[in-house]
């Protein structure tokens, strides 16, 4: 492994855990993480989120007819995938759909920074 995280102390433990608990191939994970580069701007953003208000401030933004319709449409279009993810990760579909709605407006906003390349 030769990327920024090749010598990260917790990476070996993480790879071992993902192999033991979820059956990931060790060589695949090593190859994947060998391409990971540290993005200080992303780490800074994650460490200091701009949001700091309570639910009352966000409720009128997120509970609109448009977002509710978008959520229902998204759920209907992606029901099999959402069901599979819900079963695999043990998270209720309602939460998955809500988080996708809050974070991306159901795919309308995916941000300007790409953190993962396939």
Image (spheres, rainbow, N blue to C red):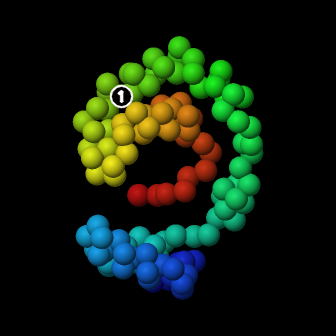
> In the image shown, does 64 or 59 lie closer to the viewer?
59
Residue 118 location, x and y as percent?
A: 41, 58
Question: For residue 59, what is the image quadrant?
Answer: top right
> In the image shown, does 42 or 19 lie closer to the viewer?
19
Residue 53 location, x and y as percent?
A: 74, 37
Q: Residue at x 48, y 20 (%)?
A: 68
Task: Report the side of 113 relative to 116 (left or right).
Answer: right
46 versus 79 height, above or below: below
111 versus 102 height, above or below: below
Q: Residue at x 30, y 74 (%)?
A: 19
Task: Report the side of 25 relative to 93 (left or right).
Answer: left
Q: Residue furthest top?
A: 65
Q: Quadrant of the N terminus?
A: bottom left
21 versus 98 height, above or below: below
Q: Secondary structure at mark 1?
A: helix
Residue 29 location, x and y as percent?
A: 37, 73
Q: Is residue 107 visible?
A: no
Residue 2 location, x and y as percent?
A: 50, 83
How many numbered circles are shown? 1
Q: Residue at x 61, y 50 (%)?
A: 113
Question: For residue 96, what is the image quadrant?
Answer: top left
- Residue bearing the label numbered 1: 75
Q: Is residue 13 visible?
A: yes
Q: Residue at x 48, y 33 (%)?
A: 98
Neighbours of disc 1 within 10 Å: few (<14), some (14-19), many (20+): many
17 versus 39 height, above or below: below
């Amino acid at each position: 492994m030769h990327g920024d995280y090749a010598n990260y102390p917790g990476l070996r433990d993480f790879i071992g855990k993902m192999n033991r608990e979820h059956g990931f191939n060790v060589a695949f994970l090593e190859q994947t993480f060998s391409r990971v580069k540290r993005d200080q701007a992303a780490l800074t953003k994650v460490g200091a989120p701009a949001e700091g208000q309570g639910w009352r401030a966000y409720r009128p933004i997120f509970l609109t007819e448009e977002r509710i319709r978008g959520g229902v449409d998204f759920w209907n279009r992606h029901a099999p995938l959402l069901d599979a993810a819900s079963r695999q990760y043990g998270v209720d579909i309602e939460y998955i759909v809500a988080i996708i709605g809050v974070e991306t407006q159901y795919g309308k906003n995916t941000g300007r920074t790409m953190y993962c390349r396939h």
